[in-house]
Each structure stands twice: as structure tokens, then as C-alpha cells.
Image (spheres, rainbow, N blue to C red):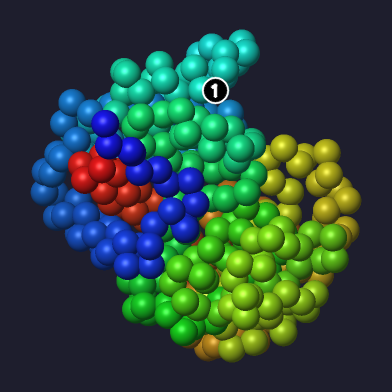
Amino acid sequence: MDTPRHFLQLTDLSSDELRTLITRAHEIKDMQHRGEIYEPLRNRVLAMIFEKSSTRTRVSFETGMIQFGGQAIFLSPRDCQLGRGEAIEDTARVLSGMVDAVMMRTFHHEDQQRFAAAASIPVINGLSDLYHPCQLLADMQTYFSHRGDIRGQTVSWIGDGNNMCHSYINAAIQLDFHLRIACPKGYEPAPEIVHRAGSRVEISQDPCLAAEGAQLVVTDVWASMGQEEEARHREQAFADYQVNKAVMAAADKEALFMHCLPAHRNEEVSADVIDGPQSVVWEEAENRLHAQKALLEMLMTTG
């Protein structure tokens, strides 16, 4: 039996594969907007395991499978034996005999690695504590559609060195752009992930310096799911890290603004920025659907 391909982080695909996937996502989006019926996954089933709540991830994967002629099954810890202590590896083996792929949204990235190691079908990371690679597919599709290839450009990440930040670091490696990260001390991205990027990544504590001349400015909430108890402390730590008009004024005049959503207006981003002319967050959100359909097609039809 062939070893399945998994997508747990962006570096699971080569640079050429990522660019091909982005191009394919554009094509699939155009087909869907023209009303063309394209069902390469008829009679295929995607199992979706969610430890965390979700809007965009669940709806985009479920809609994508339906539009591709397949089906998606939603599983929360309450709906399956994982929530009652069944070994991750055992669940992986069972589902491998019943469905055609699995998408997982988990607290611990290690759980996805263990699941994938035991699975004989593709496993997709729908979000973990370390990475959110599917969001980066959508972000890059959005950037490419507005500005062309991101190679050689400068991206500014403002805020927490979290899973999204880690995925932007991987994107900088794979797609060859420069990433400037501005975050408070103590909230930097994981050193081992930063180290792999070499000179492509810079870290500072100055949002305007990080945004200077950038073609893309990105942020995320200050307290992610599972960090609610830290919210008040994080509000104080990140008070100077809001993406606002001053930050955007430091960026390139044609800079785009992105946010993976959900957003807290006037916390990590001012309302006039997220609702302003440089913001592409709604297209970015829609592109989760098209980018993930391209990913599903690649993993489930070509092996």
C-alpha cells in the first residue's frame, strides 16, 4: 500500500507544489463562480475531528466536500471514542478503513502527528497549537490574486508568536519572502521554528518598524482558544501592538491587510483598518473554501 500524503504543515509540500496548489485554487474558484459542476470526489468521505470550535474551518471543508460530490462527517470528542480515552493510533486505524481522509483540529500538534503516523489515508491539519497551514493556503491565494507571486516581498506579522505566526514563518521559507515579526517580549514564536527560516525572519518589539515598506500586514487575536484565562494579562502585554492607521501608514501604500478571523475590532486591529480599503479579510475567508478544495483534490486523487 502506498504511503499517504499528509498536510500537517506547509513544509509537507515543496515550494513548487505550493505554487501549483495556489494556481489550482484560483482555477477551482473560477469554476465554482461560473456555476460549473466538478465532482472529483464522488462517493469519497472526509472525517472531520474537532477538539476546538470552528466556523470557517468546518464550513469550508464540509462545503468543499459537498461541492466536490463527496460527504463530510463531523466528529467532536463527545461524538467518538477519542473523548473516552481510545488511543489516537487505534482511532486512526479504524477511520482509515472507513473514510478516505481525515481533517483534524486539535489542541496538540503531537496528536495529529501520532494520528498521521498510524493512518493509511491522508491527514490534514485544520489547526493545532503549532500550525494553521490551511489558513496560509487561503492567505497566499488571496495575495497572489491581488499582487502576483509573493517571492521577494516583505510581510509584517504584528502580535502573538502563535500557530499563525509559525505558519507564516514556514510560508516565508517555502515561498521565499521576508517576514518581519513584531511581538512583546515573552510572546515570540518558537525559536526552533524561527531558526529554520534563517535570514528570512526578523523579530522586533516595534510594530511600525516591522511594517515599514511591507506589502502585506497580518495579525491575529491576542488570546487564542484555550488562552481565555490569560486574556486580561494579554490585553496589557499587547496594548501597543494594534494594527491601526499608523501601522498601515508605515507599510507600502499598496499594502494589503489580512486577519484569519474571528477578529476583535479595536483590540488587535482598529475598525477603520479591518473595514477599510486595504483589508481583504472577507475574500481571504472565502478562499479557505477554494484553497482547501485544491488541497483535497491533490491529496485524495493523486496520492
| Secondary structure type for disc 1 | helix
Query: Quick check: 232 above or below 284?
Result: above
Front one among 125 and 219: 125
Q: Do we see residue 266 in this rendering?
A: no
* Picture quadrant where residue 249 is located: bottom right
Instruction: Categorize mark 1 by other alpha carbons within 10 Å: few (<14), some (14-19), many (20+).
Output: some
Horizontal side of residue 130 vs 146, given as left or right: right
Front one among 123 and 186: 123
Give the residue type that dot 1 points to.
Ile
Q: Residue 24 in the image: x percent, y percent? A: 24, 59
Front one among 94 and 58: 94
Q: Which residue is mark 1?
A: 88
Query: Quick check: 88 above or below 132?
Result: above
Q: Residue 278 in the image: x percent, y percent? A: 50, 75
Q: Do we see residue 30 in this rendering?
A: yes
Horizontal side of residue 189 vs 198, given as left or right: right
Query: Quick check: 207 above or below 165?
Result: below
The C terminus sits in image quarter = top left
